[in-house]
Amino acid sequence: MMYASTLLASLSLATSLAVPHPNDSLRVARAAAAGRADSAAATRARAALAPASVDSIVIEKRARRLILFVGDSAARIYRVALGNNPVGPKRVQGDGRTPEGLYVIDRRNPQSKFYRSLHISYPNAVDRWLAAEQGLTAGGEVMVHGLSPAYAAQYGAEHVKWDWTEGCVALTNAQIDEMWNAVADGTRIRILP
């Protein structure tokens, strides 16, 4: 009985940390209708986003799309590469999946082996509980990141033609630079199937 009450308290805390924007579905639909994802060249050519101006991020795994929202407007739409086994939510370490659910950007690494990275707060209490039910660990270190020097030189923007990460979300280095400045720690990120 004590375990159930502890789990419920953890679930309550986890959901309060990453409350979805009330209009996520509508905002995502508008963004999808508005146009295609930004190319790396388009990202460089557009006016810069103001520092810490992004209030939420939505990733649509099926569409391989990451959307940065400022208010109700899609400020940027990027094509992304996902985990090498992208269908379904991440459940355990090493499954090659990108998580699904509500999280926050909770820290950053300016010296990532993938150029720069923004950490997604996976696993939350629910993720840890689901993995523990299988006798496994949920994993962690799921990031939105750029490209390693080798990938940047060899593939650049073409990296999105296949899903190659271990569960992370990969962008070009120009795109992660733009996100780095526009997204503050604590920004909500919702990852949809």
Image: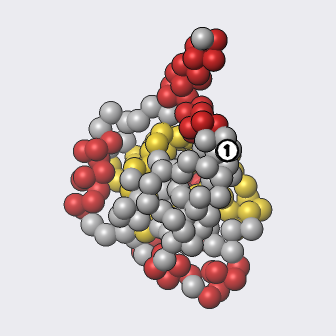
Residue 65 found in image quarter? bottom left
Seen at 50% across and 28% down, the residue is: 15
Q: Say which of 84 and 17 sits in front.
A: 84
For the view shown, which residue lies furthest in the bottom direction? 154
115 displayed left or right of 82: right
User: What amino acid type should be assigned to the residue bearing mark 1?
Assistant: Leu
Residue 138 found in image quarter? top right
Q: Position of residue 90 (x, y in %)?
A: 54, 51
For the view shown, which residue lies furthest in the top direction? 1
Q: Position of residue 176 (x, y in %)?
A: 58, 63
117 displayed left or right of 36: right
Seen at 77% across and 62% down, the residue is: 111
Coloration of the structure image: secondary structure
178 displayed left or right of 29: right
87 displayed left or right of 170: left
Q: Is residue 157 visible?
A: no
Q: Is residue 97 visible?
A: yes
The N terminus - image quarter: top right
Seen at 39% across and 53% down, the residue is: 193
Label 1: few (<14), some (14–19) or many (≥20) C-alpha neighbours in 10 Å: some
Which element type, helix, strand or loop, lies under badge 1? loop
Residue identified by numbered label 1? 136
Q: Position of residue 37 (x, y in %)?
A: 37, 69
